[in-house]
Image (cartoon, grey):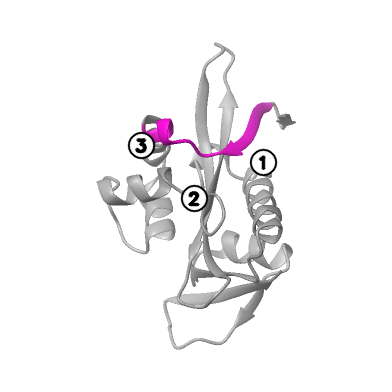
């Protein structure tokens, strides 16, 4: 289904093994600050093992959705990704979200996380957990608006958020 928000036409769909180039292009569109917010430190390229993990999800205990823009030239461009992966706690998964800098503040992150939450509920996941750097104010605001609760943890660098499904 095509979504039209603020002049951007895009769709949200499950990630596919053939999305490697798009995933790398999305990473390349991120500012150093966005990379730090997502990976908790500055990195210049995605590790190969990470790429393979993201591309090869089982779509039940782990899942990833991408937001893909349909450009005016008719090409598709990955502009965001949401993902969950299992934690050590049964039926609990850690989530992540990335939206290309030029596409933030258009509701894409909200739509990606909502789709991820919906999928997790459909597949018996009981909670989603996320660790947000304390200076990542926009992400903290977004997850709070989506119903995630801030829970105590021992880190000064991260705030832990949990959504019970």
The mark found on residue 24 in the picture is 3
Q: Quadrant of the C terminus?
A: bottom right
* Residue 7 vertical position relative to residue 101 in the rendered view, above or below: above
Give 62 or 154, whichever is nearer the viewer: 62
Give 40 or 165, whichever is nearer the viewer: 165
Give 89 or 149, whichever is nearer the viewer: 89
The x, y position of residue 88, in whole percent, is: 45, 76
The x, y position of residue 55, in whole percent, is: 41, 43
Say whether residue 44 is visible: no
> Which mark sits nearer the N-terminus, 1 or 3?
3
Q: Quadrant of the N terminus?
A: top right
Q: Is residue 122 left or right of residue 34?
A: right
Which residue appears at 37% of the width and 50% of the height?
53
The residue at which mark 2 appears reads as 58
> Which mark sits nearer the N-terminus, 2 or 1?
2
The x, y position of residue 36, in whole percent, is: 37, 58
How many marks do you count on the picture? 3
The x, y position of residue 31, in whole percent, is: 39, 45
Residues at marks 2 and 1 touching, judged by CB atoms closer than 8 Å: no
- Crowd band around label 3 with a 10 angstrom C-alpha radius: few (<14), some (14–19), many (20+): some
* Residue 63 vertical position relative to residue 67 in the rendered view, above or below: below
- Crowd band around label 2 with a 10 angstrom C-alpha radius: few (<14), some (14–19), many (20+): few
Select label 2 or label 1 by which is in front: 2
> Which mark sits nearer the N-terminus, 3 or 2?
3
**How far is the residue under mark 3 from the one under mark 2?**
21 Å
The residue at which mark 1 appears reads as 106
- Magenta extent: 8-20
Residues at marks 3 and 2 touching, judged by CB atoms closer than 8 Å: no
**In the image, is residue 9 part of the stretch drawn in magenta?**
yes
């Amino acid at each position: 289904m095509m979504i039209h928000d603020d002049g951007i036409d895009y769709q949200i769909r499950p990630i596919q093994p053939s999305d490697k180039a798009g995933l790398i292009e999305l990473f390349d569109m991120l500012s150093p600050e966005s990379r730090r917010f997502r990976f908790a430190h500055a990195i210049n390229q995605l590790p190969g093992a990470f790429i393979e993990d993201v591309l090869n999800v089982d779509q039940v205990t782990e899942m990833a959705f991408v937001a893909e823009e349909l450009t005016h030239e008719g090409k598709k461009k990955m502009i965001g990704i949401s993902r969950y992966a299992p934690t050590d706690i049964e039926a609990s998964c850690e989530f992540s979200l990335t939206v290309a800098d030029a596409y933030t503040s258009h509701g894409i992150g909200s739509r990606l996380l909502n789709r991820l939450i919906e999928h997790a509920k459909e597949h018996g996941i009981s909670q989603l957990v996320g660790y947000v750097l304390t200076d990542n104010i926009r992400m903290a605001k977004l997850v709070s608006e989506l119903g995630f609760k801030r829970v105590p943890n021992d880190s000064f660098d991260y705030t832990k958020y949990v959504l019970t499904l």
